[in-house]
Amino acid sequence: MGEHGCERVLRMGVLGCADIALRRLLPVIAAHESARIVAVASRDSAKAALVSDRFGCSAVTGYQRLLDRDDIDAVYIPVPPGLHHEWVVRALEAGKHVLAEKPLCTAYEEAVDLMRLARRLGLVLAENFMFLHHSQHATVRSLVEDGTIGELQVFSSSFGVPPLDPASFRYRPDLGGGALLDVGVYPLRAAQLLLGPELEVRAATLRIDEATGVDVAGSVLLSTPDCVSAQLDFGFQHSYRCSYALWGSRGRISVDRAFTPPEQIKPLVRVQQQDRYTELAVAADHQVRNALGAFVDAVLSGAGGPLAEDETLLQARLVSDVRGAAKVALVKGHSRQRPTASGPRATAAGQ
């Protein structure tokens, strides 16, 4: 690890100049007291140079050249999901700890492979689901555990955005595109967080863009062993929605902007109990900084192996099971035309 005064500093490299990296992670890494951006790599030397100038780090042309450097301890990988397995393997084999953007992989078997490799090499590997690090979800779990809404019956969640840029990798099957892997994974991960590890997929639908071959919308029904159900919807053909709700025998809890709350706002957790309606303003929180901090702390503390391995593998299995269970319908490619109406920015992963 690098040294900064008397403190250890995690020296980080970034593989790729993806939008989410530029908007979210790189500014937070640059501001973190225990992390430093050493280099950013792109296959486009001009793009790498622009990003390096902005963040005061080295520019590297080509991902492998960055991994070959001995002044980097860990890498953040925001390349398209279809490239994750290859570059996470290469990074781990180069002795680097890895923070990989969600989803970790496009196939369950690939996720298992990466976990085994990270465990064998004693390197930290984390899937970057940033919303998990916002305190509002701990508030929700506490309310449920305290019996605020009685016995839980149904969990529901939606994450939909308007059509994206047609040139985006999200419309390319070979790069791991599609709504399930981009926005559908959020309701799935939230269901796991709030209902526990024994979820099973019971039914699913996927709407496939006939022009590109990627799924642009879908729904999933899951259940726990005692038949608490989870009803999930997601897609690229929707007005913006990003929410979840828990419905119990004595009330209901709902959360808007569940996966994308800006760090400056105090999210509202709404509780309905018969004729009583309560809005709880949760403290503002910075889920991006918290997610990075958890990774940095794990590496600097000497932790070896994957973080949240069981949860990450269950997530990958559920995605695989959704695909296996899904009833599929083709839709016309004109649905990818981007709307001109104003509204929340439609970015994949919405983070």
Image (spheres, rainbow, N blue to C red):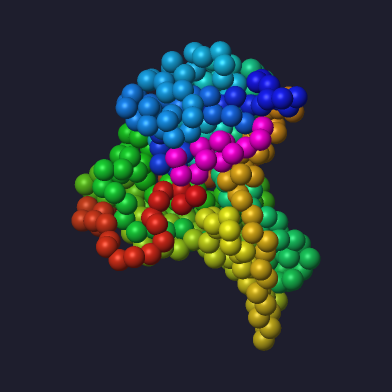
Asked if residue 288 shows in the view, the reply is yes
Q: Identify which residue is drawn at 49% across, 50% down.
A: 351
In the drawing, does residue 156 fall left or right of residue 236? right
- Residue 63 pos. (x, y %): 42, 21
Is 33 rendered above or below residue 62? below
Q: Nearer the viewer, residue 41 or 174?
A: 41
The magenta span reads 22-34
Asked if residue 26 is positioned above or below residue 120 in the image, the reply reads: below
**Residue at 56 percent of width and 41 percent of height:** 28
To which quarter of the image does residue 140 belong? bottom right
Q: Residue at x 42, y 23 (%)?
A: 59
- Magenta part, dominant SS: helix
Return the residue found at the far bottom.
Answer: 275
The location of residue 317, given as percent across then percent down, is: 54, 40
Tell me where residue 169 appears, x and y as whole percent. Answer: 33, 40
Report the number of discs.
Answer: 0
- 42, 132: nearer the viewer: 42
Q: Is residue 102 above or below residue 243?
A: above
On whether residue 144 falls in the magenta region, the answer is: no
- Residue at 37% across / 45% down in the picture? 178
Frontmost residue, 79 versus 185: 79
* Residue 115 location, quadrant: top right
Q: Can residue 154 be seen by looking at this rendering?
A: no
Query: Which quadrant does the N terminus fall into?
Result: top right
Residue 324 horizontal/vertical position (percent): 43, 44
Vertical side of 200 occupied by 31: above or below: above
